[in-house]
Image (tube, rainbow, N blue to C red):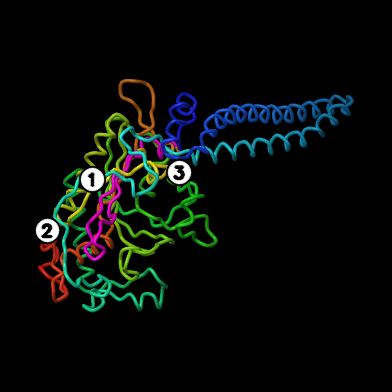
Amino acid sequence: MLDIKFIKENAALIKKDLAKRGDKEKVDWVDEVSKKYGELWKLKETNDKLRHKRNVITREINELQKQGKDIKSKIKEAKELPGKIADSDKKLAEVEERVDYILQNLPNVLHSSVPVGKDDTENKEIKKWGKPTKLIDLHSHGRILEDKGLADFKRATKISGAGFYFLKGDLVKLELALINFAVSELEKKGFTPIEPPLMMLRKPYEGVVALKDFGDVMYKIEGEDSYLIATSEHPIAAMHMSETFEEKELPIKYCGISSCFRKEIGSHGVDTRGLFRVHQFNKVEMFIFSKPKDSWKIHEELISIAEGLVKKLKIPHRVVNVCSGDIGIIAAKKYDIDAWFPRQNKYGEIISCSNCTSYQAVSLNIKYQKEKKDEKEYVHTLNSTAFAIGRIMVAIVENYQNKDGSIGVPAVLQKYMGKKVIGK
């Protein structure tokens, strides 16, 4: 969320940014939250005074009783306080709920380089790499994987429902090869591998995403106030909740490896069965805590690292600057990398790379202690997909497919696989 102090000091900037995002209905929230926040503190002060008065009167009544003096007036006064406190509590809760709602739903302030646009059709292409593959009679990746005994979607659907899969044989080895390759490359860049919990409690999760909006795509654990994670970015972001780093510790770079779970999967163009949109998938994620002054430079480094991984697989792709109407509320700037999918005859997203500035850090209360000043400041958080394994495997199957339906193994993965072709 945005810091309330920042909102008060930058109201005009935030209103202008909301117009850029097309969120004009939220413009009035900027003044409202500043006003409500002032009311909140007055109500808290009133509430504290009423409770203090109740304690004082209780002591006074006890003292008067010891002295044998009349306590009727004090008793009358004491009886009036519970109602006043209840009214004050109700007003306080109402204002607090409204302030929290606005703060959780006001979006981050966009970087000046974010293009204005209504949706993903207006994202700005930055560059392309590689020549798009064109194959005749290209079979769907789902059909090929089943025909070659590398996956079983039918039996997975039978026991788990649509959107799940069994991976088998060399396809399991390909997944492990992709994970090992990514982790090895990222360790060279200073990332520490980390395997996070696959469930998170509501409170820390609310510090990472707006659960009221994002909760619809997440699996809630029945009978518990917790959720299966949608990406390792979420537990890693919350890992240092309510902590303060020393300035010299930053940046801190994590490489998350985890399964991810999502309810809503949609469809992937002409193919309804396969690995592209599923309820459960594995992913390697990059996450960085940085000083504010370094985050934009790190964001460019992060997208370069992510693209470097795709280049080493020799997958044709493009990099796009995500527009204001497609970016969501958390990121201040986001790049997507879209791989070329020849069966679709179009590019499709495989990587998202975001600078969330202090937005998550404010919600999670993550700061750093400045070395030369006796003050603390919120860190910036950045994240990027390294490999969403299912999607990158689809890209490999489609771009490395041979006429006989076998699949070439990218050169950088062959040492992990021990072979150059699978599905022969």
Q: Secondary structure at mark 1?
A: loop
Tell which circle, 3 or 1, labels the residue nearer the N-terminal end. Answer: 1
Horizontal and vertical percent for residue 313? 15, 57
Q: Residues within 10 Å of mark 3 (few under 14, many from 20)?
A: many
Tell which circle, 2 or 1, labels the residue nearer the N-terminal end. Answer: 1
The quarter in which the C terminus is drawn is bottom left
Find disc 1 in the rendering and name its residue: 191
Q: What are the residue bounds of the magenta stretch?
A: 333-362
Tell which circle, 2 or 3, labels the residue nearer the N-terminal end. Answer: 3
Out of 14 and 256, give the one closest to the viewer: 14
Residue furthest to the top in view is 373
Q: Secondary structure at mark 3?
A: helix
The disc at residue 412 is 2
Q: Residues within 10 Å of mark 2 (few under 14, many from 20)?
A: some
Find disc 3 in the rendering and name its residue: 207
Horizontal and vertical percent for residue 155? 35, 78
Relative to 94, is 199 on the left or the right?
left
| SS assignment for the magenta stretch, majority | strand
Q: Residue at x 39, y 64 (%)?
A: 279
Amino acid type of the residue tagged 1 in the rendering = Phe
The total number of labels drawn is 3
Out of 102 and 181, give the one closest to the viewer: 102
> Quick check: is 13 in the magenta stretch?
no
- Toward which corner of the image does residue 296 lie, by quadrant? top left
